[in-house]
Amino acid sequence: GAILNEGNLMLDSVKITSSHASYGGGIFNNGILIAKKSTFKGNTASSKGGAIYNNGTLNMTRCTYDKNIISEGNTIYYGGSAIYSRGIIYLSDNNFTNNNHSPIFIKSIHYVELNTITSCIFTNINRTTSCIFCSYTKLFLSNSIFKNNHASEYSEIIYSESSTINMENNTFMNNSGD
C-alpha cells in the first residue's frame, strides 16, 4: 500500500491512487487517521480494505472513494473496497462511487464503540454484497443517500450481522438486488 500509519496521521487534499496491498491498498491504519477533502481512486486490496484498512480510529470528512476494489474472494467476508474497519469510524460528507464488494465493511472487535456515517452518498455500487456491511458492531447512519446501487450476492443495500444500526433521515432511490 501507499501508507502504513501506526501513530497520528492527518491528510488534507491528498490523492491516493492505483496502490495495492493484501490489506489496505491505499492506507493501513493502526493509529489515528484524520482526513479531509482527500481522494482514494483505483486502489486494490486482495481481500480487505481496497482504499483503507482500519484497526484504529478513522475520521474522514468530504473525501471521495472511486473505483476501489477487492480483487479476490467472493464471500460476504471479503469486502470494504473503500474501507474495511475493525476499529472506530466517523464519516461525514463522503462520496462513494463505483466501488465493489461492500464499500464499507465494519467488523468491531469490541461491540461498545459507536461508528457514525452521516451525510454520505453511495452511487453506482455494483457487484457487491451491500453498500454497508456491519458485523458485531453499532452504527448510527444519518442524512445519507443510496442511489442506483445493485447488490448481486445478497439483496440488500445495508447488511446487519448481529449489529445494532440506528438510521435517521436517509434516502434510498433506484436500488436493486438479485
Image: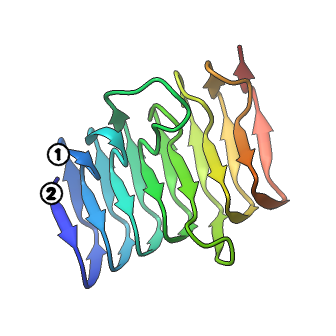
Residue 168 position, x and y percent, is: 84, 62
Picture quarter with the C terminus: top right
User: Which residue sits at x=33%, y=79%?
Assistant: 31
Distance between mark 2 and mark 1 Cα atoms: 6 Å
State the SS at label 2: loop
Residue 126 position, x and y percent, is: 53, 24
The quadrant where residue 76 appears: top right
State the SS at label 1: loop
Vertical side of 17 occupied by 119: above or below: below
Outermost residue toward the top in this view: 178
Residue placed under numbered mark 2 in the picture: 2
- Amino acid type, callout 2: Ala
Q: Are marks 2 and 1 in contact (CB under 8 Å)?
A: yes
Q: Which mark is residue 60?
A: none
Residue 64 position, x and y percent, is: 41, 53
Depth order, front residue of 54/96: 54
Tell whether 137 sits left or right of 106. Answer: right
User: Which residue sits at x=70%, y=54%?
Assistant: 144
Residue placed under numbered mark 1 in the picture: 19
Residue 34 position, x and y percent, is: 38, 78
Vertical side of 133 occupied by 123: above or below: above
- Amino acid type, callout 1: Ser
Q: Residues within 10 Å of mark 1 (few under 14, many from 20)?
A: many
User: Which residue sits at x=68%, y=24%?
Assistant: 154
